[in-house]
Image: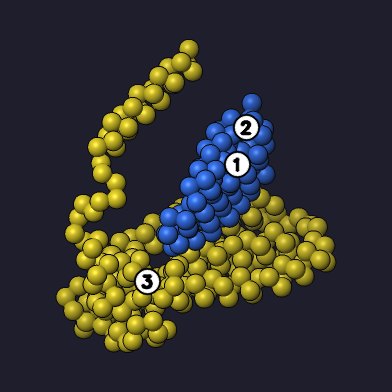
Chain colours: A yellow, B blue
């Protein structure tokens, strides 16, 4: 009986979504703002990657909101999981030599790749969020491969707070001297396709990369600590 | 090209349905990881490499790791 009712409900929802979607012409531009970004984005922001120019420059305040949401999620998780009562000191079985050496060999390479992605965020695909996630996956590899190694919690907290502070301070400097709005681009734009170009966009993306990487690494650290 | 895309979409649908009906939760997590991985490939084929990188790094790697840790702390089999 329950299955029949849920099947009927799924059918109703599917028909509703289909009726809502069927009249939308996909692929035709409905607004003018997309064409504006594509035509004017490069000369206005100096970033070769238009996605980055939208995420950091035109919609920079939304990005600050996204980073804040991730921060609140990490804080809530650690508030739920971390109990200060007792640290269980259990004997951890060390991993084998091949696994240990391989993980320690791969770890700096993955870190460099993540750093490359968020430093070149204004030139190539990728950016702070992607680079930060790759850095966090490098820490995940260390946790899985070399048992017993830990990153210090105070250091991840410090990196997280400092990078968040850099984001807000750069935005406030832009508000003060650059123009009329938060996160306005007050540095010189430089030459297109060069590493030192696009004004504040690389600074913001490096800050986002550090923040996302330290937050996700901290989440994994707290989960692994509880699981042992 | 259209054959590759339709094959990927069919595999994605099968693994999404499989993730919902597996009783062994570890298999279900791997199936949902496959959904994220194929979504990343499809984003790349649709010329959205930024989204593809985010989906591959977060959806396929970190979310799977979080689920595996959660399953190792709770029960593995669904009644």
Image mark count: 3
Q: What SS does tag 2 mark?
A: loop
Q: Chain of mark 1?
A: B
**Is residue B14 or residue A168 the one in the foreground?**
B14
**Is residue A20 or residue A95 the one in the foreground?**
A20
Q: Residue at x 73, y 57 (%)?
A: A89
Picture layout, residue A12 above or below residue A87: above
Mark on residue B31? 1
Q: CA distance from mark 2 to mark 1?
A: 9 Å
Residue, far left: A180
Q: Chain of mark 2?
A: B
**Is residue B44 or residue A184 the one in the foreground?**
B44
x, y percentage for residue B36? 53, 49
Q: CA distance from mark 3 to mark 1?
A: 33 Å
Picture layout, residue B59 above or below residue A115: above
Q: Chain of mark 3?
A: A
Q: Residue at x 29, y 50 (%)?
A: A27
- Tag 3 near tag 2, CB within 8 Å: no
Q: Do marks 3 and 2 share a subunit? A: no
- Tag 2 near tag 1, CB within 8 Å: yes
Q: Can residue A225 be seen?
A: yes
x, y percentage for residue A18? 32, 32
Residue bearing mark 3: A49
**Is residue A156 or residue A52 the one in the foreground?**
A52
Residue bearing mark 2: B22
Q: Residue at x 33, y 60 (%)?
A: A65
From the viewer's perspective, tell me whether residue A177 is left or right of residue A169: left
């Amino acid at each position: 009986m329950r299955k029949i009712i849920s099947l009927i409900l799924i059918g109703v929802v599917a028909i509703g979504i289909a009726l809502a979607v069927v009249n939308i012409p996909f692929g035709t531009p409905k607004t003018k703002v997309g064409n504006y970004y594509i035509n004017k984005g490069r000369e206005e922001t100096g970033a070769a990657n238009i996605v980055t120019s939208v995420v950091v420059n035109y919609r920079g305040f939304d990005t600050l909101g996204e980073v804040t949401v991730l921060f609140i999620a990490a804080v809530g998780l650690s508030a739920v999981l971390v109990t200060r009562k007792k640290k269980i000191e259990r004997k951890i079985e060390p991993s084998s030599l091949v696994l240990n050496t391989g993980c320690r060999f791969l770890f700096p390479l993955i870190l460099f790749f993540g750093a490359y992605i968020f430093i070149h965020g204004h030139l190539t695909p990728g950016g702070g969020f992607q680079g930060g996630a790759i850095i966090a996956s490098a820490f995940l590899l260390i946790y899985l491969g070399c048992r017993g190694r830990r990153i210090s919690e105070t250091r991840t907290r410090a990196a997280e707070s400092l990078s968040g502070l850099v984001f807000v301070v750069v935005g406030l400097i832009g508000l003060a001297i650059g123009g009329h709005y938060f996160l306005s681009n007050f540095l010189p734009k430089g030459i297109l396709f060069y590493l030192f170009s696009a004004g504040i966009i690389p600074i913001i993306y490096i800050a986002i990369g550090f923040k996302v990487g330290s937050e996700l690494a901290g989440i994994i650290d707290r989960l692994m600590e509880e699981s042992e | 090209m259209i054959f590759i895309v339709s094959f990927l979409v069919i595999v994605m649908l099968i693994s999404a349905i499989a993730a919902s009906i597996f009783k062994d939760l570890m298999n279900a997590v791997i199936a949902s990881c496959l959904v994220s991985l194929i979504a990343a490939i499809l984003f790349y084929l649709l010329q959205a490499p930024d989204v593809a990188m985010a989906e591959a790094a977060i959806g396929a790697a970190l979310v799977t790791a979080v689920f595996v840790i959660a399953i190792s702390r709770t029960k593995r089999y669904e009644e």
